[in-house]
Image (spheres, grey):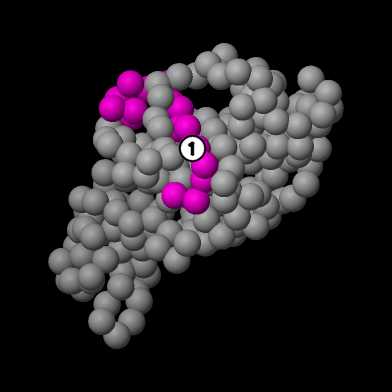
Amino acid sequence: MVDALRDSHRVLVPEGTLLDLRPTAETQPLEATLPDRVVIVGELEAQSPRADDDAADAAVHDAVGAGWFIPSAARQFRVAFYWDSVADLAAYAAGGRYPKHVRPGWADLERAWRELRPSRLGCKRSLSLGAYRRSSPQ
Amino acid sequence: MEIDPEGVELAALGAVATFTGARVLEIGCGNGRLAKRYAVATRLTVGIDPADDRISAVGMAAVPALRFVRASVPLPFRNETFDVALFGWSL
């Protein structure tokens, strides 16, 4: 990770901007959208191994400490995810860098989908965004 | 699947960096979901990812300023090429 940050410093122009956008490990309510209301049908657990987050934080800390970048902004926000079916959600859960899990389980979610017949499933995930200004000296 | 139809993610990125007219490198672009959204405003956007299957799954970029390249560190670009370097869900 530090190598990637060092090389990012190299390819950025002086005063250029480095952005570190990452999902926050968390468990969020899984919502079914009905014509007249939203019903919570479970939870989506989207955890990344703590060691990976710590390693990324340490790499950024080292890059700042080395004088390559200067922190300029940090924020957190929530982004909505929507799926048209349980199968659509399952494909998402199986992909990506880390598998995601639903609670209480897929069979319960399928049952809720058949009973409620929602138009879609959704949840919100928190993201963190760090911005850093590239320092001038190479 | 639909992610962020409200554009919250793009708004947050735009609040901390200038994308309009910029040369942007996205490191670990995956399937290009994010790059395809912001690239339209940029002068050049290059999305790189080390995974063959991800890059080949990106398909044709509908935005002329957008390129996808299979690459990783060391970055195959000259010094001081980009105005913005984005690790989008990849650091």
The residue lying at 27 percent from left, 77 percent from top is: A34
The residue lying at 33 percent from left, 29 percent from top is: B54
The residue lying at 26 percent from left, 44 percent from top is: A91
Q: Residues within 10 Å of mark 1 (few under 14, many from 20)?
A: many
Q: Does the stretch in magenta take in A26?
A: no
Pick the front one: B15 or A29? B15
Residue A45 in sight in this render: no
- Tell me residue A41's x, y (percent): 33, 66
Specify the amino acid type for callout 1: Thr
Q: Is residue A21 left or right of residue A92?
A: right
Furthest residue to the bottom?
A36
Q: Does the stretch in magenta take in B41?
A: yes
Furthest residue to the left?
A114
Tell how many labels.
Answer: 1
The quarter of the image holding the N terminus of chain A is top right
Pick the front one: A2 or A118? A2
- Tell me residue A121's x, y (percent): 30, 63
The chain that hosts pointer 1 is B
Q: Is residue B67 left or right of residue B20?
A: left
Pick the front one: A50 or B84? B84
The quarter of the image holding the C terminus of chain A is top right
Residue A71 in sight in this render: yes
Location of residue B51 by image quarter: top left
The image shows residue B71, relative to residue A64, as above or below, that is above
Residue identified by numbered label 1 = B45
Q: Is residue A34 left or right of residue B13?
A: left
- Tell me residue A6's x, y (percent): 69, 21
The image shows residue A81, relative to residue A39, as above or below, that is above
The image shows residue A122, relative to residue B86, as above or below, that is below
- Tell me residue B14's x, y (percent): 60, 55
- Looking at the rendering, the stretch of residues picked out in magenta corresponds to B40-56
Q: Secondary structure at mark 1?
A: strand
